[in-house]
Amino acid sequence: MQGFNMLSTAIKAKSIFAIICIALFQEVGFADIYKYKDNEGGWVFSDKPNTGQLERTLPRTTSFNAGKKNILAILSKKYPYGGSVQYATLAVVTVQSELGSGSGFFINENCLLVTNKHVVRPANGRRWEQTRVAIAESSASFERGRLKLDNNKELLELERERLGAFRQYLNGLPEGLEKSRIEGEYIARQNRYQQNKAHIQSESEKFVMQERLFLQQKSDFNFSSSLSNVAQTFELRLKDNTRVKARLLKVSKTDDLALLTVDNCLSPFLEVASRELVYQGATVYAIGSPLGLHDQLTKGVITHVASNGIATDAQILPGNSGGPLILENGAVIGVNTLKVANKSVLNKGLGVALPIERVLFNFAEELK
C-alpha cells in the first residue's frame, strides 16, 4: 500500500528497548604529547618534538591514569598527522538520538561538544514533522483499506447467499438437459466464489500483518518522540568508531545550537577561525556523517557570507547537521545546519552553516 510504503521510508523500525553497549577507554601508556603549528597555521599534536621545541600539552607519564579519558592521545596515535584538514576530522563525531543521528564537534580540549539543537531535540525538527505527517497519511490509508476490505467481505457474503439460492433452485429442477446445463453454470459460479474467497482471505491476512507492523512502528515513534523531548544523554561515535556517552549542557533559545559534554576527558578540538579569513571564494570543507555514513568530508567554496549564515556549495546532506564547516587551516567557521530549500537555479544545492560566532555568543559562559 502506498501509505504503508511512505511510512517505511520515513521511519526505520528498531527496538527501543535494545541495550546500548558503550565502549570504555582503557588506560594506555603515552610519552609526551607536543603541540605546535605547521606551515599552514594548523595545530599539530605529536609524541615527537618539533625542531625548535614549542609547547608540551600533556605531562610526561608512563600511563595516563589521572582519571580522564584521553581521546586526544588515542586518536592522534591511531591517525598520524596528514594535514590540518585531516586533523580536524579527529574532533568530529556522530551524535545518536532516539529518532536518528547527526554530527557534532569538540570546541575545546575539555570535551565540550557543539551540535544542532534539532539533532538532540529531533521531535521539534523538520524530519520529525515529515514522519508525523507520513504516519497520519498511513493511518488514513489503512482506514480506507479496512473499509474496502469490509466491503469486499460483504459482497462475498452476498455472493455466498446467492450461490445457496441457486443450489436450491437447481435441486428443484427435474433431471434432463436443462438441469445439466444449469448445473454447469452453478459449478462455474461456485469456482468464482472460491477464488474470490481465497483472494479476500489472502488480502485480509496481508492487511492484518501490515497494520500490526505499522502500529508497532507508530508506537515506537511516539515513544521515541516522548523520550527525545527529555533526553539528557546521547551516544557519540568517534572517528575510530569508539562509542562514548555525552550529556546535554545547554540548548540555545534563539539558534539551532546545543552544547554537550563528555565528562572527565581530554579531546582534540577545532580552533575558531579569524573572521577576516571568512570571505566569498574561500575554500571550505564540511565534515560529518551524512545519510548514515560516518566520517565523511566534502569540499567547496564560500558562496555568500551573512551575519546569520554562511552559504557554501560544499555538499551538505541529512546527517551533516551539527558538523563543522572549516577552512584549509582546519579552523572552524560555522556549524552546518541545512541545505537551502529554495528551488531557484541560483540557490539550488547550496548549504548553510551558522557562523561560529553564534556558538561563542550562545555558550559564552560555558566556553569561557
Image (cartoon, rainbow, N blue to C red):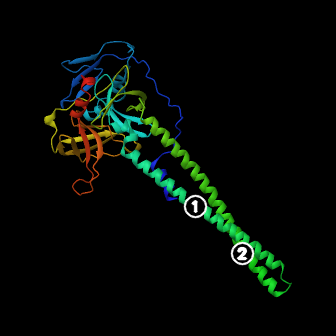
| Real-space CA distance between mark 1 and mark 2, rounded to the nearest whole angstrom | 25 Å
Residue labelled with disc 2: 189
Relative to 201, say whether 315 is above or below.
above
Q: Is residue 294 visible?
A: no
Provide residue 83's location: percent of width, then percent of height: 25, 33
- Determine the residue positioned at 65% across, 68% down: 155
Provide residue 323's location: percent of width, then percent of height: 31, 37
Furthest residue toward bottom: 177
Secondary structure type for disc 1: helix
316 or 26: nearer the eye?
Answer: 316
Residue labelled with disc 1: 147
Asked if residue 128 lies left or right of residue 269, the reply is right
Relative to 255, say whether 154 is above or below.
below
Q: Is residue 12 visible?
A: yes
- Determine the residue positioned at 36% across, 46% down: 126
**Amino acid type at image mark 1:** Leu
N-terminal label among 1 and 2: 1
Q: Quadrant of residue 96?
A: top left
Q: Callout 1 environment at 10 Å: few (<14), some (14 to 19), or many (20+)? A: few
- Determine the residue positioned at 81% across, 83% down: 180
Furthest residue toward left: 276
Provide residue 261's location: percent of width, then percent of height: 35, 26
> Which image quadrant: the C terminus?
top left
- Determine the residue positioned at 39% across, 46% down: 127
Task: Verify CB contact (< 8 Å) between mark 1 and mark 2.
Answer: no
Provide residue 103's location: percent of width, then percent of height: 35, 37
**Amino acid type at image mark 2:** Arg
Q: Quadrant of residue 37?
A: top left
Q: Callout 2 environment at 10 Å: few (<14), some (14 to 19), or many (20+)? A: some
